[in-house]
């Protein structure tokens, strides 16, 4: 690399496509070029390794998918993000790219802004991966210990118990990934909450291609298997597992059943979280509305009292010009005072209704398990 620039490896057998990519990258990145899959493997293995590889899909002798698999099989190059560049936009092509180990997909003709954005995401993901490699190793060791002591069914029971303590959609997604990882399974999950879309993965990040695939696979049915890949869809929860132990049919069947129960339980907890969030928002909004009503009632009372005082003053000032007797004046004042008293009685009844509403709000707060609020956020 020169000048500390990140290094991009372009793999394409088309000189024209290479030229287009280089024109968009040369200002910000150090660019290497390979015109075949075999040459790409050689360059990627050299130190320093490329930070990102832009891999053409259609190439002679070794296509982009084959080259990517070879890269992922090599411990020295497996952590390099591969972005496929293809003229095809079908789900089948993207699934092939995902299965080969790609992290994203760019459709020809390449849009410069989109390309640069995807490269930035890929570089950030690789940095995150390298920074957390040691932590993931420790987590795997801890998962193996937990697996040996708890057993397969214990994982599901532990998940169910811990899920009730989760208070966020992201926390639930992380717990699903952690529990599934206890079976030594690489997995990604998508939770479609009423207010947010959340992803989590056993690799610590969910690539853009994985996110798109999870959204599309949500419509393929409740349980779908294809080789070592398993897709589970229960309501608003979708999970993609890549390494089911297909060489052990009995274990594979048991894990599939355990995971179905786990994801079904997760979907129920997600629904409960949505309801809790909606109820909490209802409590906040109701308190805010109640405060507005209280303020309006006080303002109306002050206005009404001021109007009544003015009426009494004007009425008393007019008695002389009307030529009324003392008895007539007294009866007229009694009529007016009676009206004022009734008006104040109605206002006090409004306060009683307000207190009843506040009691309902307090019961809602207790039901939702949320602390009281003093107004909207």
Image (cartoon, rainbow, N blue to C red):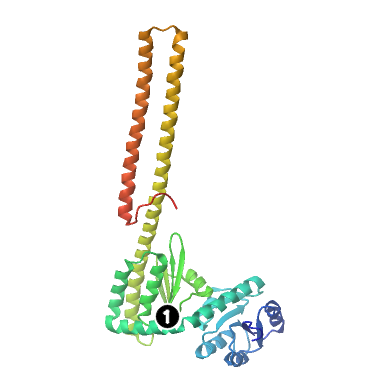
Percent of width and height locating residue 205 = 48, 76
Q: Is residue 269 above or below residue 280?
A: below
Residue position marked by numbered label 1 in the rendering: 186
Please tell me whether mark 1 sits on a helix, a strand or a loop.
Answer: loop
Q: Is residue 87 above or below residue 366?
A: below
Nearest the eye: 35 or 217? 35
Residue 239: quadrant of the picture: bottom left
Percent of width and height locating residue 148 = 29, 84
User: Which residue lies at the image location 38% right of the left edge and 79% below the top edge?
Assistant: 181
Residue 123 located left or right of residue 276: right
The answer to whether residue 61 is visible is no
Question: Within 10 angstroms of label 1, few (less than 14), some, or many (20 or more) residues?
Answer: some
Residue 350: quadrant of the picture: top left
User: Which residue lies at the image location 66% right of the left edge and 83% below the top edge?
Assistant: 3
The answer to whether residue 65 is visible is yes
Nearest the eye: 223 or 294? 294
Percent of width and height locating residue 46 = 59, 92
Count of numbered tags: 1
Nearest the eye: 288 or 46? 288
Instruction: Name the quadrant of the N terminus.
Output: bottom right
User: Which residue lies at the image location 46% right of the left edge and 70% below the top edge?
Assistant: 199
Percent of width and height locating residue 260 = 35, 73
Residue 296: quadrant of the picture: top left
Q: Is residue 327 above or below residue 13?
A: above
């Amino acid at each position: 690399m020169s000048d500390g620039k990140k290094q991009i490896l372009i793999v394409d057998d088309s000189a024209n496509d290479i030229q287009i990519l280089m024109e968009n990258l040369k200002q910000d990145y150090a660019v290497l070029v390979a015109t075949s899959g075999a040459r790409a493997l050689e360059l990627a293995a050299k130190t320093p390794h490329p930070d990102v590889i832009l891999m053409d899909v259609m190439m002679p002798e070794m296509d982009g998918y084959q080259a990517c698999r070879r890269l992922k099989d090599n411990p020295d190059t497996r952590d390099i993000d591969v972005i496929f560049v293809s003229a095809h936009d079908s789900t089948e092509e993207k699934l092939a790219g995902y299965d080969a180990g790609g992290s994203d997909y760019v459709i020809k003709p390449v849009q410069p802004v989109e390309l640069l954005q995807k490269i930035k995401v890929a570089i950030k993901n690789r940095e995150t991966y390298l920074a957390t490699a040691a932590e993931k190793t420790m987590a795997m060791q801890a998962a193996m210990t937990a697996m040996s002591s708890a057993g397969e069914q214990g994982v599901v029971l532990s998940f169910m118990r811990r899920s009730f303590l989760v208070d966020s959609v992201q926390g639930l997604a992380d717990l699903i990934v952690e529990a599934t990882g206890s079976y030594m399974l690489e997995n990604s999950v998508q939770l479609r909450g009423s207010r947010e879309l959340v992803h989590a993965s056993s690799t610590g990040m969910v690539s853009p291609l994985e996110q798109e695939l999870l959204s599309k696979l949500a419509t393929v049915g409740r349980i779908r298997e294809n080789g070592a890949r398993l897709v589970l869809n229960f309501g608003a929860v979708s999970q993609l597992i890549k390494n089911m132990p297909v060489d052990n049919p009995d274990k594979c069947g048991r894990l599939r059943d355990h995971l179905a129960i786990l994801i079904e339980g997760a979907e129920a907890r997600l629904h409960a979280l949505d309801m809790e969030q909606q109820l909490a928002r209802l409590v906040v909004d109701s308190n805010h509305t109640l405060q507005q009503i209280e303020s309006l009632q006080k303002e109306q009372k002050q206005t009404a009292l001021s109007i009544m005082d003015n009426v009494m003053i004007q009425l008393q000032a007019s008695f002389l010009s009307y030529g009324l007797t003392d008895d007539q004046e007294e009866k007229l004042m009694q009529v007016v005072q009676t009206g004022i008293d009734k008006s104040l009685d109605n206002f006090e009844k409004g306060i009683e209704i307000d207190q009843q509403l506040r009691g309902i709000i307090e019961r809602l707060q207790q039901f939702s398990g949320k602390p009281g609020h003093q107004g909207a956020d």
